[in-house]
Amino acid sequence: MDVRAPMTALAALLALTLPAPQAGAAPAVLHLAADSEARWVPFELTAANQIRFRTLVNGHWVDALLDTGATDTAVTARFARTATLKPLVAGRADAIGGAIALAWTGIDRVEVGGLVRTGGRVAIIDADPRATGPGAVDLFVGADLLAGHALEIDYDSQRFRLLPSGRMPFRGAIVPLRLADHSRLYLASMTVSGGPARPMIVDTGDGGMLSLTRSAWLASPYAARPVTSAIGWGLGGAVETDLAVLPALHLPGIAAREVEVRIERDHGFSGSKGAAGRIGGGLLRRHRVLLDPQAGRLVLADGARSHWPVPRSTSGLLLRREADRLRVLHVMRGSPAAATGWTAGASICAVDGVQVSRATAAPMTGWAAGTPGRRVRLTLCGGGDRALTLARFY
């Protein structure tokens, strides 16, 4: 499945906190190679701002996501069947979008750059494919593998590496960072534009820029700004939030221009973990990043793309490509599409007279965030045309 729309409104929101595993597997042994600093891992930065790379699990090559929002490393049920991993203990886990079922299993060997873990456990989960975008992902590398080391992410060069904790290979703004006592999430203590210092989850698996609980949003200096609605997917399913774009955002040592903010209910994933929100890959990708909870610091330095503008929908239609059509997933509140009666579930088969097909669907979705004032003619698959005039509405 291919989800196509500005990331201002469609996002993958990966975070997963798992209960403590019970019984069954050999003790985990982690070894960081002496030359780990030289073992850069190349990655693809996906359209959802996630870090996707290839690595080995039990001798099988898999596509993996680097996910500091996952407390424990997990594999998909599909991979478990392929690798004949036997579920040992069943359970449930908290995830964005709702709780999910899981099973624990033993694992022989996992490799990530210069780090090798033998033994230990991983969770087997049924991942919602909308949370990872196009293509198969079978491994979610979590804090159980990463948190004992310094993780350096060079977004400009699209590579990362694991270093001994305490190493600081570049200079930048330093933010206190720790692991949460119970959930083992990465928590940064920071102020957002002069507000009170609050813990924020640092989640490389979250494709958004910044998420705040509603209480944190209302306490911020931005609460009066116009908001619309958005939709994203976590491992537990769809999540609808409010959405705003800030002209500027001040974090410790960093002044960012144009930042997209999702406003979540207080009892959503972040709030339930005692955090004021999450910092995701959409914001991290503007920087060079060092995450070292053992040394108590997050280091951020401006990258080459530190001032990239945020794309905004001007139609209010969030779309998914389905072979010869575009399916409307969500209609943003206060948008031109909402004002003209569009609803989720509608199907579009032509744009300005050009038929949608597998060959043309990807470039044809650019109109959904096109120039304000443009008039677009959309042909419904059930028959009839509808005109939509694009406008800036948030």
Image (spheres, rainbow, N blue to C red):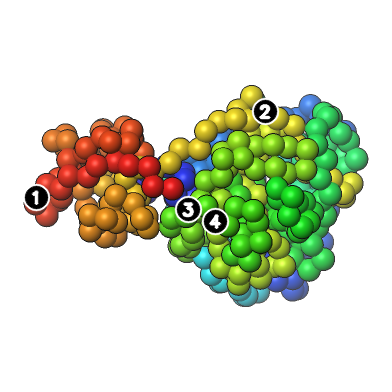
| Distance from Cα at disc 2 to Cα at disc 3 | 29 Å
Real-space CA distance between mark 1 and mark 2, rounded to the nearest whole angstrom: 47 Å
Q: Earlier in the sequence, mark 4 or mark 2?
A: 4
187, 44: nearer the viewer: 187
Left or right: residue 22 compared with residue 351: right
Between 346 and 54, the one nearer to me in the picture: 346
Point 72% across, 67% down: residue: 274
> Which residue corresponds to the image point at 29% horizontal and 49% vertical from the top-left?
336
Q: Is residue 226 left or right of residue 163?
A: left
Residue type, numbered disc 3: Pro
Which residue position holds label 2? 303
- Which mark, by number, is residue 224? 4
Q: Which residue is mark 3?
A: 226
Secondary structure beneath disc 3?
Answer: loop
Using a 10 Å C-alpha cutoff, classify the residue at mark 2 as few (fewer than 14 neighbours), some (14 to 19) or many (20 or more): some
Which one is closest to the eye, mark 2 or mark 3? 3
For this orientation, the residue located farthest to the left is: 383
The structure residue drawn at horizontal position 64% and vertical position 53%, both measured from the top left corner, is 221
Give the CA distance from mark 1 to mark 4: 39 Å
